[in-house]
Image (tube, rainbow, N blue to C red):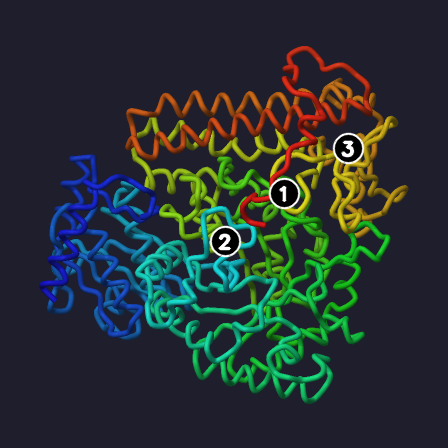
Amino acid sequence: MKKTLCTLLFFVLLYPLLAEDGYRLWLRYEKIDNNSLLQTYRAAINSIQVTGNSAVIASARQELLTGLQGLLGKSVTQSPSPGTGNILAGTWQQNALLRTLIPADHMKATGKEGFVIRTVRYQQKRVIVIAANEDAGVLYGVFNFLRLLQTQQPISNLSITSAPTIQLRLLNHWDNLDRTVERGYAGFSIWDWHRLPGYTDPRYTDYARANASIGINGTVLTNVNANARILSPEYLEKVAALAHIFRRYGIKVYLTARFSAPVEAGGLKTADPLDPTVQAWWKEKATEIYRYVPDFGGFLVKANSEGQPGPQNYHRTHADGANMLADAVAPHGGIVMWRAFVYSNEKPDDRFKQAYNEFKPLDGQFRKNVVVQVKNGPIDFQPREPFHPLFGAMPATPLMMEFQITQEYLGFATNLVYLAPLFKECLDSDTYAKGKGSTVAKVIDGSLEDHPISGIAGVANIGNDINWCGHPFAAANWYAFGRLAWNPQLPSDEIANEWIRQTFSNNATFVQSTSRFMMASRENTVRYMTPLGLHHIMGNSHHYGPAPWTNKAQRADWDPIYYHRADSTGIGFDRTAAGSNALAQYSPDLRRQYENLKDCPDNYLLWFHRVPWTYRLSSGKTVWEALCTEYQAGVSAVRDMQKTWNGLKPYIDAARFEEVQQLMAVQEKEAVWWRNACLLYFQTYSRMPFPAGVEQPDQTLEYYKSLRFPYAPGI
């Protein structure tokens, strides 16, 4: 034990001397640079006592030792006898002293995963108590306490009670078995399937630590475009090796189930969910999985979408398919997350409407252990989308949110785009399902309809790049997702402030300046990509860069012209009663707001209306003038961000400063590309000049049309 602690202390003290590469994410545990505060912390913390013998408690104990020794710059001991540590952590029921120090009613609000942190008096001394009802709560409490120290908060009079409002807080990895990552922009998959289970990369433990530190309690290891081979004994042995590591951090593993697996892997002639032999095959497969992974979480399924097989191949419904799988995992306590991302090129109706049309009639037909997973918007993770109309429309069915953390439509890992404002914009949206205040957050946390199961998922932006997410700022979106999954009410700027302080510096100038441009970054990206409600005008397939002229995709609803519908008379998609009538899928309150052209917010104008180029907005500008000035404003904002960053060089390490500086230069070029390509194209229809203040493009439209990206990452 002494040798282990010495090695750990050596590592903690040595690491700051090494170059910053982003690997430690927000868990850097650098020595406190405020000397006065450091002395206060040191006086308050000399030893710890973490009670309990489980693997999760062991992780909490080790994290507390690691964190404190790094932050305090000194060795912290483990107290041998009850109550002698400055920090006392453990489960309330199993520790008599904790039951003395923390009243029972204080523990009620914490549930299974929550915790309390209190500064109390014991034997004439001040003691910091971290108590929870279950082991996972102790681990989350330890991470919360370390966050306080990392962000240099006072700890002399702590009184914190925290519990997650959403039960299932998952990352969805779109990772393939060959280690490619669909829509991944940070290298290859971190799952080294070839060397598993014999070799388990230490990175897996650091991955689990990072997730646990922000409250994520589940991970789907494989792509929703699933491969049935993951269900084979060979791969289940590999999955079990990962599950063993993650279990120590309160994280369950889930897998994607390919609906046609009974045919492809089981030798059956059908995958019909109502066929008894198919049902028996899945039940046997579920039992087999649980032999390898006793706490297996369940399945995530993409079916009858973008060519994936599903129950509709056999003239069955989504409920038939989901219930068949749900019955297979139910005896083991598993769940099924059935994705609602469905649309068909054969159906002439607005793609916006198709998921609602398919799933709304199925409300109440799913098993109790089925959650329908719905993307935040009705199209596909656009820079800005209205919330999906299914939220609030299926009161008898638990709905689970699906956000995209990876930046498929937001410039990949070359653009700095802080996504918490996007997540919050959706979560705070009012569905009016049960009157005013029926927010999307209340739908997915189960409180609106009192559902016993609730969930939220984020499509991961993680790869094997040394800094995990590609761009040094991209990890902020992983962090923000986890924090909002725990508490959807947290403000975006508070989350940004936490992340900056832990990842870079507590210097006030640096924190304030960086937080300011992070908070503005998503809106600025919308401005130079898809202003005024434009959407899905990215390059076909790879989704890299602008291509509003594309009209030769395999299916109409993959083409940008399907969405912007620009011609000489105007631009925009009419989703009012006079058009596709997609607005009818929202509550009457929202429908009235968006259907009235005068009341519709400018940022959703072209989502819901088709307007002439000369239509005047409330600003007095025509649509053409507003479009031009918005694109220019987005470019200018990126340049302002560059200037701000250049002024922050004295406050952080050279390696990360230079990397971000170079990537901001790339982002500025891409913003100019977006502005020039889109305005030149739309100008062929508006036939109007650029207004004053909008820079003239330095290339022709034909030049931009000629650009090709056959090896863009993430395809």
Q: What SS does tag 2 mark?
A: loop
Report the mark closest to the observer, 3 or 1.
1
Q: Is residue 507 left or right of residue 404?
A: left
Q: Which residue is mark 2?
A: 460
Determine the residue positioned at 51% across, 50% down: 184
Q: Which structural element holds mark 1? A: loop
Within 10 Å of the Cα at label 1, are there few (<14), some (14-19), or many (20+) other Cα atoms? many
Q: Is residue 593 visible in this depiction of the protein?
A: no
- Residue 683 in the figure: left or right of residue 670: right
Q: Residue at x 44, y 43 (%)?
A: 470
Residue type of the residue flagged with mark 2: Ala
Quadrant of the image for the N terminus? bottom left
Query: Mark 1 sits on what residue?
Result: 543
Figure disc tally: 3
Q: Residue furthest right?
A: 578
Going 47% across and 26% down the picture, which residue do you hit?
A: 665
Q: Is residue 586 left or right of residue 284?
A: right
* Amino acid tagged 1: His
- Residue at image coords 57%, 42%: 422
Tell me if mark 3 has few (under 14), some (14-19) or many (20+) residues whose alpha carbon lies within 10 angstroms of its own: few
Q: Are marks 3 and 2 in contact (CB under 8 Å)?
A: no
Q: Which mark is residue 516?
A: none
Q: Nearer the viewer, residue 77 or 379?
A: 379
First in sequence: mark 3 vs mark 2? 2
Residue 705 shows up from this direction: yes
Q: Does dot 3 land on a helix, a strand or a loop?
A: loop
Image coordinates of residue 610 in percent, x first then y, are 83, 34
For marks 2 and 1 on the same chain, the one whose residue lies earlier in the sequence: 2
Q: Which residue is mark 3?
A: 599
